[in-house]
Every structure is written in C-alpha cells, then in structure tokens.
Image (cartoon, rainbow, N blue to C red):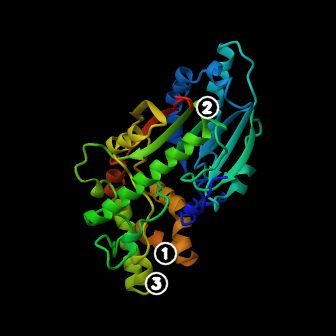
Amino acid sequence: MENNSSIALLVSYATKGGDGPHSYKQNSSIQRGIIEAARKLTQDSIAENFDPKTLSGSSPIPICIADLGCSAGPNTYFAVQHIIEAIEFQYQSHGLPVPEFQVFFNDQFPNDFNTLFGNFPLKRNYFAAGVPGSFYGRLFPKESICFFHSSSALHSISEVPKEITEKTSAAWNKGRIHYANAPKEVFGAYANQYQKDMEAFLHCRAQELVGNGLMVLQIPTIPDEILDPNVYAGKDFELLGSCLVDMAKVGLVTEEKVDSFNLPIFHSTAKDLKEIFEKNDDFIIEKMEAIGSPNLFPEDVHIMIKHWRAGLQGLIESHFGEGIVDELFDRFTKKVVESPEIVKETMQGLVVLFVLLKRKPHDA
C-alpha cells in the first residue's frame, strides 16, 4: 500500500452536516443546479466515450464509480443516477448484459456520512460504500475504478500555503482571509498550491482508473479574460474577512486568530487549468467547455448567504470554535444587504467548467 504520510497535513473540514436550517442538505441548490446543467454533457460524454467492449477485458465487475467530494446532501445521488443510466444504455445498445454497479461516495473524514447514508434513495440500482479521505491522495486500489465524477469540489486546495501565515514572509496575508485584493505574493502562493494539488489529484486518479476509464469534473473557474485574477469576484470572501477583523477590534475573536485564518479555496482560469491537464501524460482531454446556464447562481442575497454558511461553517468552527458563527454571519448578512451588488459581481465572476478526461491505456 502506498505511503500516505505526505498527506497528513491536508486541510480536513466538511460542509455543515445534518438537516437543519444551516445544513448543506438544505442549502445546496446551486450545486444541484450545476449537476443538472451538466447532465446532458455527462451523458453525451458517456455515449461517445464509454465502450463496454473495450472495458470488458480490463474493468472489474461490477462497474465501479466514485463521486469525489460528495458532501452530505442529496446532490450526489442525482449525479450518480445520471451516470448509471448512461452506462446502462451503452451496454443495452451493444446487446450486452448490464453489469452490477458499485458506487463509492468520497469526502473528507469529518463529512456527515450518517446524513448522507440516512437519505439514500428508496430505490437504487447499485451497491454503495463511503470512502473518507482527501482526494489529493490515493483512495482506491490500482485500476479499480471505471468512472470518476466530481462536482463543485476541485476549487478547494489541500492546505493553506504556509508562507501566507508567516509574519516574516512577503506573502503574509495579515487582515485578510483570502487572496482577493491581496498582494501578488499571496495569490502566487495560492496558485502554486493549486497547481501542486491538481497534479497530485491527476496522478492518483491515473493509478486508480482502468485503462480507457473516464473522469468527469465540474470545476468553478474564473474567465480567462480577467486581467487580475486575484481581485476576480472574491468580494464575498473579502467582506467576510472584514467582519472577522471588526469582531477582533471589539474582542470577540483575537487578532492573531484572524491573521492565521485563510480559506483553502482557489479559482483557476480555464486556460491555466487546461495547461495543468495537458502537462499530465496519463489523460486525454476529450471535452472542456463552460456549462451554459444563465440561472446557475441566484441573485437573492439571503439564499447566497445560506449557501456560504453551509459551505464554510465547518472550517470556521474548526479554527475559531462554535461560538462565533451566528455573530459572524449576522454581521456578514448586514454588510451584504447594504451592498447587494457583491452577490451579483461574485457570481458573474465564476464560470463552471465541464471537463471530460480519458485515461490512456496502461500499456500505451
């Protein structure tokens, strides 16, 4: 088994579990919309690239599918069902018996797998298992997975770059929690970390996929034409950071805690992402395009705030403790309501990229 000691320091946090008013389950309609918008692209990709006859000699039975970054909500079930339906159709159209399916649901160790598995569809045509762990490390045996899927997860980096929390570093990110409107050294540190993470992600998946196996990714990115990516649409994170600074000024949190807190989130441009994929020798880019849907992101500020909280609460609590979350998001809500254009600018600055990668045959 591969030594995983090198990933011991990876960031480990999860979206808000349970089914309460602040949970990911109740506040993930945006992620669901992305999966639905990508449905036809996913199923067309399988129709064009998944050949049961090619896979039959090398792939395991049952057909193994993994959803990376599944979280605790129901969205993963819709994605998996889209994939299975398309693969079933491929077997039927080739006159082959439809195999059994094994689906692996992966997310970080703190993920609420109890809520995930407690809400399984009553009727499902697959066996299921949870696989906790970071997808920036190995998760599965070699050549064991036929199809990987990941949606709205690959903008999270494995760890905050160390130099942005070091006072002696040019990249010290004092008074901010992200690289938006930060010095170029901060952005550079984030960009370097993202590149290393994506290279590790591709290396691991290349070992786990069968030859000719497929991987479908839906990744939030920023438009290539944005000249200064470190000020892209990150005004949401900039504003949230200002709320923490305000709380430090009145003694609700310490200044040191704020200065040591940075979000492990990075949005690449499509151009830079493509370069990372092209440098990898194990995959072929079969398709790469923006998901065209004008309604992926709502303009209602209260809906967006709930989504932000569901996604970030676990990370905030792990750093500051549970006591500050309500106060922080009350302050954040007031600032966003006073400047509703922040939501619009943030969402307009994001483009969800659909990527289809095919694993080159292992004997190539």
| Residue 30 horizontal side relative to residue 185, left or right | right
- Mark nearest the camera among 2 and 1 is 2
Q: Earlier in the sequence, mark 2 or mark 1?
A: 2
- Residue under the image location 35 percent in, 56 percent down: 191
- Disc 3: which residue: 252
- Residue under the image location 54 percent in, 53 percent down: 136
- Mark nearest the camera among 3 and 1 is 3
Task: Determine the secondary structure under disc 3.
Answer: loop
Q: Does residue 152 show up?
A: no
Contact (CB < 8 A) between labels 3 and 1? yes
Q: Residues within 10 Å of mark 3 (few under 14, many from 20)?
A: some
* Residue lying furthest front: 363
Contact (CB < 8 A) between labels 2 and 3? no
Judge whether 19 appears above or below 40 on screen: below
- Residue under the image location 42 percent in, 68 percent down: 262
Residue 306, how many percent across, how many down? 50, 58
Amino acid identity at mark 3: Leu
Q: Does residue 116 show up?
A: yes
| Residue 362 horizontal side relative to residue 240, left or right | right
The number of numbered discs placed on residues in the rendered structure image is 3
Between the C-alphas of marks 2 and 3, the distance is: 47 Å
Residue 179 or residue 306, whichever sits in front: 179
Give the number of the disc on residue 327. Answer: 1
Residue 189 or residue 178, whichever sits in front: 189
Judge whether 17 appears above or below 154 on screen: below
Between the C-alphas of marks 2 and 1, the distance is: 40 Å
